[in-house]
Image (spheres, grey):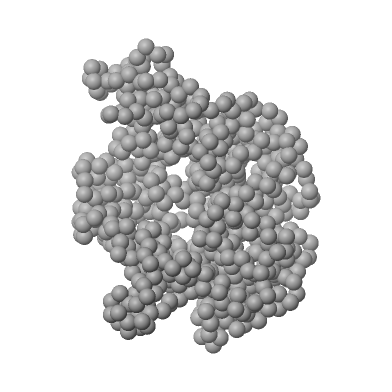
Amino acid sequence: MSIVRVAVDVPLDDHYDFLAGDAALPPEGALVVVPFGRTKKVGMVVGLAEQSEVPRAKLKPIQGVVPDVPPIAPESLELLRFCASYYQRPLGEVIAASLPPRLRQVNRRALPPAGEPTPAGRFIETVALSTAQQEAVDRVASEPRRFAPVLLQGVTGSGKTEVYLHLIARTLAAGRQALMLVPEIGLTPQFEAHVRARFPDATLVAAHSHLNEGDRARGWLAAQSGAAHIVLGTRLAVLMPFRDLGLIVVDEEHDGSYKQQEGLRYSARDVAVRRAQRLEIPVMLGSATPSLESLSNARDGRYAWARLATRAVAGARMPRVRTIDTRADRPQDGLTHGLILALRQRLERGEQSLLFLNRRGFAPVLFCRGCQWHSACTRCSANLVLHRAEGRLRCHHCGHQERVPAICPSCGGTDIAPVGHGTQRVEEALQAALPTARIARVDRDSTARKGALRQVFDQVREGEIDVLLGTQMLAKGHDYPMLTLVGVLDSDGALYSADFRAAERLFALLVQVSGRAGRGDREGEVIIQTDFPSHPLYAAVASQDYDRFAADALDDRRLVGFPPFSHLALLRAESKNAGEALAFLKAAAAIARRIHADVEVFDAVPAPLERKAGFERAQLLVRAATRAVMQPFLAQWRSDLTARDERRVRWSLDVDPQDL
């Protein structure tokens, strides 16, 4: 065999053929440098062959094997092949997505060897497990060498993390590695410190996109060699190679952050389950509000189901939830009188409060009362958000920004004013209403500096912050015993969204943010400001009745044929020229209808954000009853669309889309 098949990160083809040349044949999974056009690329060997469809005279030799990166194991390569096939992407792109940027560089400084596996050492037990926690551990530990998916449904503060740590301890004691996924980068430092304290002798590596290139590459190599006992990371960690992976934990398994939204649009939760199945190892999915897909699997017996119904701290109770009718108690700068009174009470008692508003900036839009001009982005079908402190109008979709105008750009009038509320505006209102309070705002703007987020959380733990105000970054994973009040501002918009998952997401978000209150021995309270206090979703949140909410939601999904009772794929298209994306999708729909009669093809429609960064966008939804029908259909559809050689329209397939 003298033909080396290499997957390279370029569109269309899954691999390209090269000659081995004078060098020894590299094994599958090895990284090699190959000539590509006028440049060189790092690719991965995905096969060897005697013959090529390309004439031998046109084949070029590989230029060398990357010396400091051992070949990945067959299991890891099989996982990448699965992702390429299931998510309908070129294998080279999938491999590139799995590699740290440093390892994809042709010319770089060599990395030191990662080292050999060593014993993991001690696990420090700080608390005894409750009966329910022990039962959850035993469900997994009783079958450590087979595929054992377990859904751990536990209320906020019920001690799910303690279950994870005991399972990791058993895995390390057996000489195997553990992978723990978390949804947000902001949670990683907190988890990392906690895990390091409990496993002082084990080697732990973090894996997320905010690490520098060197640390990411060293962590990848440590996991591959087995030198890393525990890998703690965001969704990208699920694609890392391991020497002997024995357990996967997916915390907050319902979280939308596990779905990649660009390029390889994979679900890290689903890939984790697939990987555990192929390796025949346990996988635990944990959440207070499981995704309806996972809950359906548990109800049907495909997953084992463990439940933690009470909080772990003695005396800690679930917070009391009430609504404030904003039609009667009109908010001033986003805050109702009732919420301000509750904040003052906590301030007087030396307790902490959290206000949740999932909208950064000062105001969503600048508006002229004279001519109805508003601050629209010229490149997107969205408004420019007012960031008053910086004196800028910014688009949160494409990054375009402008100076705040002194007069209306349309009519020249001076009656222009911000409309709506963002975190910056509410921060000013809080400072006026609570002049003695120490207030910290947490959003993407305030925590852009490295280490800023951790500094704020440390201040909260030390009691140096009275009121924490922020976006979704605050909603999950943080444990502050002195935090007894959570206020939720402006959550009504999701109640009547066209997206069929909107209610599920809102319920999960409200439960998560509500769970920050009363985690110690002091009673917690949650106040939701709303125009619709009698809405069934808020009633379900108030009663902490996720099971009833989920049962009703599953009944609705079954009635209309949406997941988990069907399988979806979304063809997205965008073009600089108006109408071209929709025209492409209409042609794609005609092709789809000829391929398979059992696949339902909907009409092509403009995307929810119809224009972004100067591109007109549209989408086409297809639905099938089973994956057995959907997967071969998608493979043929993708092949037919690729053969059209469309140059003016960019398109991509999103399998199991989370946003419609």
**Furthest residue in direction front, as rendered:** 406
Q: Residue at x 46, y 29 (%)?
A: 108
Q: x%, y% of residue 534? A: 54, 80
Number of disc labels: 0
Which quadrant: the N terminus?
A: top left
Viewed as shown, does residue 160 lie left or right of 4? right
Image height of 398 relative to 634, above or below: below
Q: Residue at x 29, y 20 (%)?
A: 60
Tell me, yes or no, if residue 246 can be seen here: yes
Which quarter of the figure has residue 21? top left
**Furthest residue in direction top, as rendered:** 22
Tell me, yes or no, if residue 600 can be seen here: no
Q: Residue at x 53, y 28 (%)?
A: 111
Q: Residue at x 69, y 48 (%)?
A: 194
Viewed as shown, does residue 298 lie left or right of 586? right
User: Closer to the camera, 490 or 591?
Assistant: 490
Viewed as shown, does residue 627 lie left or right of 323? left
Image height of 641 relative to 225, above or below: below
User: Closer to the camera, 425 or 329?
Assistant: 425
